[in-house]
Image (cartoon, helix red, strand yellow):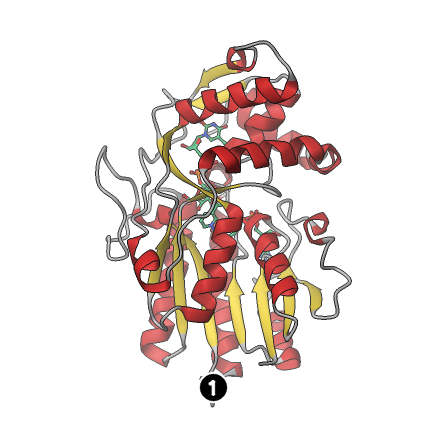
Amino acid sequence: MKKNILITGGAGFIGSHVVNLFVEKYSDYQIFNLDKLTYAGNLENLKEVESKSNYTFLKGDIVDESYINSIFFKYKFDAVIHLAAESHVDRSITNPNEFVFTNVIGTLNLLNAAKKSWANDFEDKLFYHISTDEVYGSLGDTGFFLEDTPYSPNSPYSASKASSDHLVRAYGETFKLPFVITNCSNNYGPNQFPEKLIPLFINNIITKKALPVYGDGNYTRDWLYVVDHAIAIDNVFHNGVEGETYNIGGFNEWKNIDLVTLLCDLMDAKLGLSKSTSRELITYVKDRPGHDLRYAIDASKIKKELGWEPSVTFEEGLSKTIDWYLDNDVWLSNIVSGTYKDYYKNQYETGNSN
Ligand code: NAD
Ligand code: DAU
């Protein structure tokens, strides 16, 4: 069925995988990618689809209410898949306001525009909000996040995401806006901006810079290959039950220090370096304030109800990811320049970050 679908944040890491998948797979959908192109947005991520007739790029800011209203009026979207966000925890500690503007007000603007545009006909309409497991706060050494785990966000980033989740749910309750929410664990893979752990450390190994491990390195994250997240989003978009939340995760927990040593060893092998060369770059640095100890998703609901599960093992995914960064050195060097240099200096070199 012909549909106009608005995907926000499609030039970013996860969004670009979602846009690429939808444009290639659904020729009867017109995909509108709305992105402000912040430091994290990169049109290079969309080269394969940019000339396709079912793809339209819209440069704009979700915080700009009149612009958002105007595109809903002009393009009469049938559905929204909302990924646009400020997404890096460390940046939320140094500049929380930007996170509230984009993640909270931006989401509110989209909800209002969808509500207005769909006012008389909610049939076949959907507001799909992409969220994170960080809204649940931190786990101790055991247990998992379930869909009904109470929200307990600890960083300005996760608080802003939690706030946006609540708004989406409230618009469903109050105005009957059809919605679905997914909360996913840490993603890794191609196109990720090298401020997040895995691409940052790959880049630092390539450029022989220190690998800044926060605190004692005994923090745990649950890692999912980004393509598997995009496949899950496709599944939930088409088969998810309206008003439901689904947790998405890889059942793949790693302590940071174990992941970093594995990454070092894989990089040594791929770069032809002698054993332990990259491990020598590991440097313990000041901890992240409010650092969540452990995230772990119980993804049984999406597996049981929608039949989704990860298709790529961590070893395969990490190997593919390293290969991608080694093959795309121009992509990487284009990014690691300009304002990113200032961010890096402030975060890791001045000693006054956090
Ligand atoms: P990202 O930072 O790589 O990309 C965000 C995109 O949003 C960029 O293209 C940016 O230009 C765009 N954007 C930012 N502010 C905007 C604004 N005001 N108006 C329009 N566009 C704007 O983020 P990501 O890692 O791809 O995350 C995408 C979504 O998935 C986010 O909502 C994030 O909270 C969520 N999420 C991320 C992860 C993860 O591990 N990266 C895990 C779970 C959920
Ligand atoms: O859990 C989902 C979330 O995963 C997403 O919602 C966020 O958008 C995404 O950024 C990610 O958040 P994290 O804070 O877990 O990811 P990050 O890559 O920043 O850090 C992963 C772990 O590595 C975390 O325990 C902090 C640690 N770390 C990170 C950096 C950047 C370091 O030890 N050193 C670093 O330099």
- Does residue 248 appear to the left or right of 202 in the view shown? left
Is residue 242 or residue 131 the one in the foreground? 242
Residue farthest along the right direction in this orientation: 51
What residue do we see at 36% from left, 71% from top?
241
Q: Residue at x 60, y 41 (%)?
A: 190
Which SS class for mark 1?
A: loop
Please identify the quarter of the rendering in which residue 36 is found. bottom right
Kind of residue at badge 1: Ala
Residue visible at 31% across and 35% down in the picture: 294
Quadrant, the N terminus: bottom right
Position of 73 with respect to 163 (left or right) is right
Q: Position of residue 204 (x, y in %)?
A: 60, 23
Ligand 2 location (quadrant): top left
Where's residue 272, x and y in %?
64, 15
Eyeballing the image, is 284 above or below 314?
above
Residue at the extreme bottom = 120
The one nearer the camera, 112 or 302, is 302
For the question of whether residue 287 can be seen, the reply is no
Residue toward you, 9 or 68: 9
Q: Total marks drawn?
A: 1
Of the 4 image quadrants, the one containing the C terminus is top left
Q: Is residue 91 above or below residue 54?
A: above
| Horizontal and vertical percent position of residue 236 | 43, 64
Q: Kindly indicate the quadrant of the structure image that contains residue 143.
A: top left
Q: Which residue is mark 1?
A: 119
Where residue 17 sits in the image (x, y, percent)? 59, 53
